[in-house]
Image: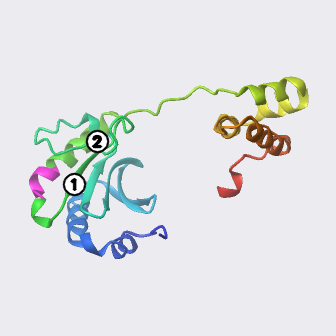
Amino acid sequence: MKMAKTPEEYFDSVPDHLDILKKLRSILLSTELEEKMKWGIPTYCLKNKNVAGIGAFKAYAGIWFFNGVFLKDEAGVLINAQEGKTKGLRQWRFESLDDIDDQLLLTYIEEAIQNQKEGKEIKPEKKPLIIPDELKEALASDSQLSETFESLSLSCKREYAEYIEEAKREETKHKRLKKIIPMIMDKVGLNDKYK
């Protein structure tokens, strides 16, 4: 599916839940939040910080709060859509227009805005860079390769390390290593062509 560039374009792509999405949008736009498009969906921000987003799925449409973990949720309506994986995001699902209590939803949105103003947010965890043995050996045996690798950004180093580590067979790991050495020497990121 093509990524929508405007809310209207997104709404056209999900006609089954259009009434719910438009209602959610009107409530969000009645606040101080600014509407933007991020990841092809309408996202509502406060000073460029994501507060909420809306979207439609097969059986429901919903609003999610990026730092919803900090909401009191006295009505018990929020869920963690990916238990064990999602830390801050919380979602509120609606199957029909009748499920939306405007005032209750506005209370949640206003609390989310206040939490953002207070700086309540979950910071992403920084994973340590783990260099697989195959790459370690290659770096140890070639000082120029090692020096060039060290000059790369952390995310670029991580892409290379994970690329080798996720291969199951030793043979595949060595093929991948052979492939990335010239890329490292050219200071090209593994996924640069997709950026």
Frontmost residue, 137 versus 105 = 137
Q: Please, what is the dominant secondary structure of the magenta stretch?
A: helix
Which label number is shown at residue 80?
A: 2
Residue located at (29% from left, 50% from top): 64
Residue type at mark 2: give it. Asn
Instruction: Provide residue 193's location: percent of width, then percent of height.
Output: 71, 56
Between 104 and 185, the residue placed more toward the observer is 185
- Residue ID for mark 1: 93
Q: Quadrant of residue 112?
A: top left
Determine whether, in the image, residue 167 is placed left or right of residue 124: right
Neighbour class for label 2 at 10 Å: few (<14), some, many (≥20)?
some
Do the residues under discs 2 and 1 have CB atoms within 8 angstroms? Answer: no
The residue tagged with tag 1: helix, strand or loop? Answer: strand
Figure quadrant of residue 135? top right
Residue 174 image point, x, y percent:
79, 37
The mark that comes first in sequence, 2 or 1, is: 2
- Is 139 in the magenta? no
Query: In the image, which disc is placed on residue 128?
Result: none
What residue lies at 77% left-to-right and 25% top-to-bottom?
Answer: 136
* SS at badge 2: loop
Q: Is residue 181 above or below residue 52?
A: above
| Nearest the eye: 188 or 135 | 135
**Residue 166 % position (x, y):** 63, 38
Residue farthest top in this picture: 140
Tell me if residue 95 comes above or below residue 119 in the rendering.
below
**In the picture provided, is 104 more to the left or to the right than 166?**
left
Mark 1 residue type: Arg
Few, some or many C-alpha atoms within 10 Å of disc 1 (few <14, some 14-19, many ≥20)?
Answer: many
Marks 2 and 1, how far apart at CA? 11 Å
Q: Which residues are magenta?
A: 100-106
Q: Determine the image quadrant of residue 53.
A: bottom left
